């Protein structure tokens, strides 16, 4: 999780070329996996991503000096992800089992001063990572690709429009570089991606994709700001540097964590 990127702009940010190169490699790979991977393989990959995201979430707690559960708990995170293969009952059972196991082990191993925080971080990681990202396992793959398009194009539009046109801060106390102009561009980009992508992936023109994409876009931007809030609280710029030009897994998927369940509830019966 500590891969260092040394090519920086004058402002101290990774050079934009790293962002493009990472996307050029990652996006086709993700699309191919989404299209061709068997259900169990797709779920396993979501599980691995959830584990990496949870580890970054725990690292924020460590940087904030509030502690974390042991690394054994990452197996529970992966288990909750895989439980989506069995349907809602399995997901609920896996999440409850993870909570019971966590509290039992912390009761036996943690000090009274550390137990509350370690349990809270563990439960928070389950809610934040596998229980949100796991909704992609429930969805048909065409819907997953459409969700990715809505989020990716919206994020890219917000990033580049914000750099070129951004003047008014969107949430200066949480993320000073995000701008109102970037947020508007991201919103428009997501809606356009949803309508055009929906016609291609789902077949026919669906007018409901206008408002579904709009709500999903807002959820995604809220997810982005929420993760920025966590980083601000921990006093770090990125959750890690594992993805050159993008930061960490949380930095790259923060929008998706909020958008996936919202998109599922709105689009998939």
Image (tube, helix red, strand yellow):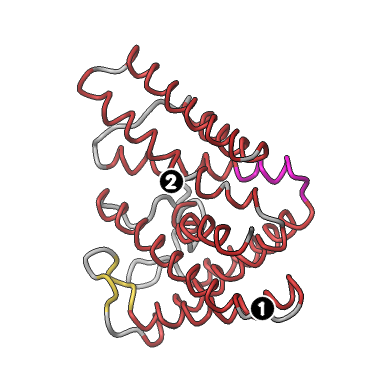
**Residue 150 image-quadrant placement:** bottom right
**Residue 205 image-quadrant placement:** bottom right
In the image, residue 115 above or below residue 257: above
Residue shown at the point (60%, 75%) measured from the top left:
209
- At which x and y percent is residue 160? 46, 80
Residue shown at the point (31%, 53%) measured from the top left:
231
Please identify, in this view, whether the residue under mark 1 or under mark 2 is nearer the observer: 1
Q: Is residue 12 magenta?
A: no
Residue shown at the point (78%, 45%) measured from the top left:
38
Q: Secondary structure at mark 1?
A: loop
The label shown at residue 192 is none
Badge 1 density bin: few <14, some 14–19, many ≥20, Cα 10 Å? few
Q: Is residue 42 magenta?
A: yes
Residue shown at the point (40%, 79%) measured from the top left:
182
In the image, residue 1 above or below residue 20: above
Predominant SS along the magenta part? helix
| 198 displayed left or right of 54 | right
Residue carrying label 1:
206
The CA distance from mark 1 to mark 2 is 31 Å
Q: Secondary structure at mark 2?
A: helix
- The quarter of the picture where the C terminus appears is bottom right
In the image, residue 221 above or below residue 195: above
- At which x and y percent is residue 91? 56, 36
Q: Earlier in the sequence, mark 1 or mark 2?
A: 2
In the image, residue 6 above or below residue 94: below
Badge 2 density bin: few <14, some 14–19, many ≥20, Cα 10 Å? some
Residue carrying label 2:
128
């Amino acid at each position: 999780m500590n891969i260092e990127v040394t090519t920086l702009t004058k402002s101290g940010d990774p050079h934009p070329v790293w962002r493009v190169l990472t996307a050029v490699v990652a996006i086709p790979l993700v699309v191919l996996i989404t299209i061709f991977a068997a259900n169990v393989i797709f779920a396993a990959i979501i599980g691995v991503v959830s584990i990496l995201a949870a580890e970054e979430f725990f690292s924020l707690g460590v940087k904030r000096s509030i502690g974390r559960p042991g690394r054994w708990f990452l197996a529970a995170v992966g288990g909750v992800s895989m439980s989506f293969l069995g349907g809602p009952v399995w997901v609920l059972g896996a999440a409850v089992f993870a909570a019971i196991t966590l509290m039992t082990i912390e009761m036996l191993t943690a000090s009274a001063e550390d137990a509350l925080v370690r349990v809270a971080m563990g439960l928070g990681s389950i809610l934040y990572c596998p229980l949100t990202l796991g909704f992609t396992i429930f969805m048909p793959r065409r819907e997953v690709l459409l969700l990715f398009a809505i989020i990716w194009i919206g994020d890219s539009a917000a990033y580049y429009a914000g750099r070129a046109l951004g003047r008014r801060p969107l949430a200066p106390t949480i993320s000073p570089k995000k701008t109102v102009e970037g947020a508007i561009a991201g919103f428009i980009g997501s809606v356009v991606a949803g309508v055009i992508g929906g016609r291609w992936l789902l077949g026919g023109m669906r007018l409901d994709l206008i408002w579904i994409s709009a709500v999903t876009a807002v959820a995604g931007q809220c997810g982005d700001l929420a993760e920025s809030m966590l980083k601000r609280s921990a006093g770090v710029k990125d959750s890690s540097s594992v993805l050159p030009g993008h930061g960490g897994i949380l930095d790259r998927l923060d929008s998706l964590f909020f958008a996936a369940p919202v998109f599922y509830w709105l689009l998939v019966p």
